[in-house]
Amino acid sequence: MDAPATTPDHAGDGATAGTVPAALSALAEKGVDLDRLAAAFGQMDEATIAASMKGLERAGRPRDEKPPPEPNGDFYDIDGLISDAQRQKMAELRQFMEAEVEPVINEAWLGDRTPRDVLVPGFRRLDLLTAIYGEDLETREPNGSVMEGLLTMEIARIDVSTATFFGVHSGLAMQSILVCGSDEQKAEWLPKMRAWDVIGAFGLTEPEVGSAIAGGVTTTARREGDEWVLNGQKKWIGNAIFADLVVIWARDEGDGQVKGFIVRPETNPGYSVEKIRGKIALRAVENGLITLEDCRVPETDRLQKANDFRDVAEVLKLTRAGVAWQAVGCAMGAYEKSQRYALTRMQFGQPIAHFQLIQDKLVHMLGSVTAMQTMCLRLSQLQDAGEMTDAQASLAKVFTAARCREVVALARDLHGGNGILIENHVARAFADTEAIYSYEGTNEINSLIVGRHVTGIGAFV
């Protein structure tokens, strides 16, 4: 007896005949015009149909379900080049910045306010400055510059304003006293500054004198017995609104040389400060316009080892590397935010990380971040060895500020319209980079410092 007739088991594409109507119904429910689809396939030649079927087979394969990589801006394993103690301190700081600072920084940034209520206890608890300056406060630790750079990078990775607050206090103000102060001045101020019991500021730039400050300090200092009388203004002074001490640089009317003075704002009636508002960058840095009007400072508060502008330049050289590290951290944070966003933002039914143009942006960002990291690490190693030159510090500032600008622009672009929302953090980095590009010597001035070194020709004017 013949076997009963059966429905063929295959429909040619691997589906059973019974599943074909269900599949067609599912397509119809999704709005697919089945007649048009059939007509289109009917007009294809065999090669085109075969290629289409291969595409359908690829689309039907189960996706690799392994989790995507965690965002990581340390592509060349800088961690592998530093000590366990440095790595541990960075990890502690990263945890603090992510858990305590990032949740509050947008509100502080929008409110023109430094979140000292969070930063000061946190930095004190982490004892960051002992890792840089040591217990004796006589000089930096043997690897203090590398440590300072890595810490600055970690802070700026979350927010540049807080890195500026850190750098003004621990870099510009503390370095001025460490390099130019007497033993008595160092003993009075440095232990309290290391413990964050007093906050320092650094007053050099003036309302009418920015890049030309080396030869154009207009704030004056006149000796009267055991006192100095200061007159003039200083502008863009970070931490000035709340600082317990401000290092003021003024030109001695007697010999024409620039000298440094420790001004105590709380008890000095000749000192006043006005908060600068309306900034589009570093809004969580409380910059001030300082006015000195017959501001009297005792001789004991004159920095005893600051005799001319070369001493100011030495402080600036030592802190310029810190600004370069700020650019590294800012770019690193923007890259990591973008990597995470690309893996989670869905468009056209899949994460945007699937698209070639997005991956190209991420690769260019990562390349810049990696180049910046390796340059700054080597610079800080030279600094710790006492071999860093002005030109080397300036080259790092020029390069990192420019590359940071590119990275944050790509990050903002990658985020699309969401990139202009402060809640995604890249908009803040995008704005803050403009300040990095301009302060601690504009990029143009730093370029001329390097140019003078490599050509032997000064082209400043």
Image: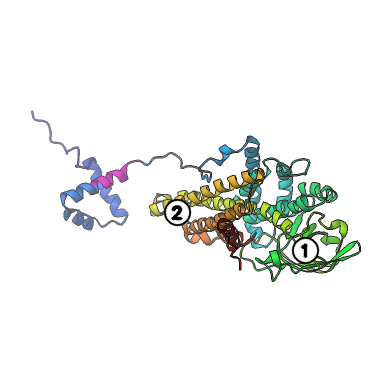
Q: Quadrant of residue 57?
A: top left
Residue at the front extreme, as displayed: 456
Residue 230 placement, left or right of 284? right
Please report the bounds of the magenta region as a residue range.
Answer: 53-62
Tell me the element at label 2: helix
Disc 1 marks which amino acid? Gln
Badge 2 density bin: few <14, some 14–19, many ≥20, Cα 10 Å: some
Q: Main secondary structure of the magenta part?
A: helix
- Give the x, y percent position of residue 209: 69, 69
Quarter-wise, where is residue 253 in the image? bottom right
Local secondary structure at mark 1:
loop
Q: Which residue is depicted at the point 20% across and 56% down?
A: 40
Residue at x-position 48% and y-position 49%: 367
Disc on res. 84: none
| Tag 2: amino acid | Lys
**Does the rendering let one see residue 218?**
yes
Residue 313 image point, x, y percent: 70, 57
